[in-house]
Image: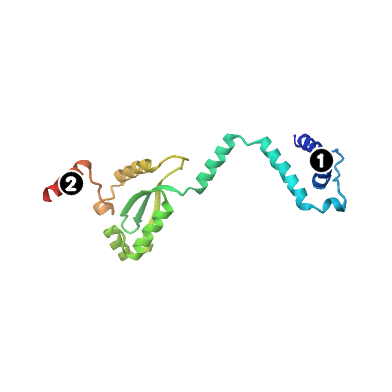
Amino acid sequence: MFQPLLQAFIHAVSGDIKESALAARLPDLGGDGMSTFCSADQRADVNYRNAIFNAFFNCFHRDLGVRMSDKKRELKREYKLNHRPMGVYQIRNIVNDKVLIGASLNLPGIFNRHKIQLKMGNHPSVRLQAEWNEFGADSFAFEILDEITPKEGRDHREELAFLEELWLEKSQPYGDRGYNKRKKGREEMLRLIAQKRAGE
């Protein structure tokens, strides 16, 4: 398939270009298996030969084309490789098995953020910070509970929120069992808003 196209290209270009750019660079197309060499004059203009050869190669590649399905498959592969892991995680106290459960679109990033906050002593969870200070960093494990496979063009936040609720319901990391605070329900939120407005 390659040689007929190459031969057609050779016949289409001028003699000087054909001899200097193709005969000097490519195997003989006559089938004898021997490489064709050019004179010293023909080898002088290396940049010109390379430009002609590259032009032919690009033209040949364009003519061959790449199927859209192959392009999409490659884009998806790159997306998965470049996309950071996302999912539900927990910070577990290995001394007493208390946990803090959360979800993030960037698991390595959220782990790093928690560690910095705990080391600096300003973590949002006062109880987690207190026990980190008491037991030390080696007494805590940062673990992935559930991971989502990224899909191109999809917003995963709703799926993450759903998974987080499932794990909170399963683990109940509240009070003596963990560091999470119960999320306020709709009715409680409305009650608090009403109380705040009444006090104004």
The residue shown at (68%, 35%) is 63
Nearer to us: label 1 or label 2 = 1
* Disc 2: which residue: 193
Give the residue type that dot 2 points to. Answer: Ile
**Pick the front one: 11 or 112:** 11
Badge 1 marks a residue whose secondary structure is loop
Q: Position of residue 166 (x, y in %)?
A: 33, 42
* Disc 1: which residue: 14
Assess disc 1: are there few (<14), some (14-19) or many (≥20) residues with their C-alpha within 10 Å of its C-alpha. few
The residue shown at (61%, 34%) is 67
Q: Earlier in the sequence, mark 1 or mark 2?
A: 1
Task: Specify whether 38 is left or right of 123.
Answer: right
The residue shown at (38%, 50%) is 89
Q: Position of residue 193 (x, y in %)?
A: 18, 46
The residue shown at (42%, 47%) is 86
Give the residue type that dot 1 points to. Answer: Ser
Residue 123 quadrant: bottom left
**Pick the front one: 50 or 147:** 50
Task: Specify whether 53 is left or right of 77.
Answer: right
**Pick the front one: 10 or 78:** 10
Q: What coloring was used for the rendering?
A: rainbow
Q: What is the C-alpha distance between the residues marked 1 and 2?
A: 84 Å
Q: Position of residue 69 (x, y in %)?
A: 57, 34
Q: Which mark is residue 123?
A: none
Residue 52 quadrant: top right
Q: Position of residue 114 (x, y in %)?
A: 36, 58
Badge 2 marks a residue whose secondary structure is helix
Task: Specify whether 71 is left or right of 104.
Answer: right
